[in-house]
Image (cartoon, helix red, strand yellow):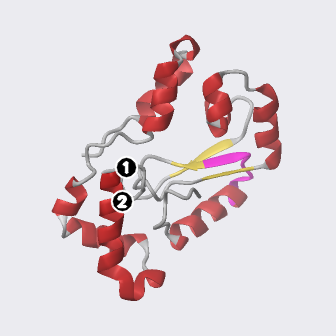
Amino acid sequence: ITADSPLISPDIYRALVNYYFDGGFDYVNTGRSLAEGLDGEIFTFTALEKAWKEAIRATDREHMTMYIFRNRELFNNGTFELSENDSQFRITVDEECDFEVVSRIIDAFKAQLHQVEWPMIKYWLLGNPDVVALNSEIVRNQGYVNALEANPQEADHADEHVKSNLTQRSS
């Protein structure tokens, strides 16, 4: 869980934790079906330590779990997905327009914010397309994409696969 994701959904994280433990994984990430801002990762200390010791690329040193994600032959990885594709929504705070979206959601639910789960927020967003449009043009995980583009000598087939998965635009 990162600080730029203030509207995490406890129900989704409970399901993610259960998926992680039930699968006996070294690393689990949320897949592309979740709204950006609901995403998360869980990993063992052993996996993180191995990545820290073995990663030599600048992008892997900056985005440590991407080393684990890219090197699936070294780790038991899993990807948690929702049954519905909610990737068109963005409820993270990376840009000023994201802050506006999240602020409007908080204003809409302020009386019961401590009880709000993702389905309630999604339903509200579906009824407020003007709010969704405020940040719909932002590329998902742009920071990692920028790191790859800044270090083209590090790009390999796996990075292109990762990059194509990360750059899915909201629609």
The amino acid sitting under disc 2 is Phe
- Residue 67: x and y, percent? 66, 31
Left or right of 80 on screen, residue 35: left
First to last magenta residue range: 22-28
Which class describes the residues within 10 Å of circle 2: few (<14), some (14-19), or many (20+)? some
Q: Is residue 36 above or below residue 56?
A: below
Is 98 displayed left or right of 133 in the figure?
right
Q: Residue at x 58, y 15 (%)?
A: 154
160, 131: nearer the viewer: 131
Q: Residue at x 55, y 22 (%)?
A: 158
Q: Is residue 85 visible?
A: no
Q: For the residue labelled by badge 2, is the local secondary structure a helix, a strand or a loop?
A: helix
What is the residue that sits farthest to the front in this orientation? 96
Amino acid tagged 1 = Glu
- Residue that lies at the very extreme toward the bottom in this rendered image: 111
Q: Residue at x 46, y 67 (%)?
A: 7
The residue under label 1 is: 95
Front residue (pair 61, 161) = 61
Quarter residue 169 falls in: top left
Q: Quarter-wise, where is residue 49 in the image? A: top right
Which residue is painted at 60% across and 27% down in the image?
59
The answer to whether mark 2 and mark 1 are in CB contact below 8 A is: yes
Task: Say the numbered circle drawn on residue 99.
Answer: 2
Q: Which element type, helix, strand or loop, lies under badge 1?
A: loop
- The residues tagged by marks 2 and 1 sit, at their Cα atoms, a distance apart of 7 Å
Let me know if residue 75 appears in the view: yes
Q: Position of residue 102 (x, y in %)?
A: 36, 65
Between 103 and 63, the residue placed more toward the observer is 103
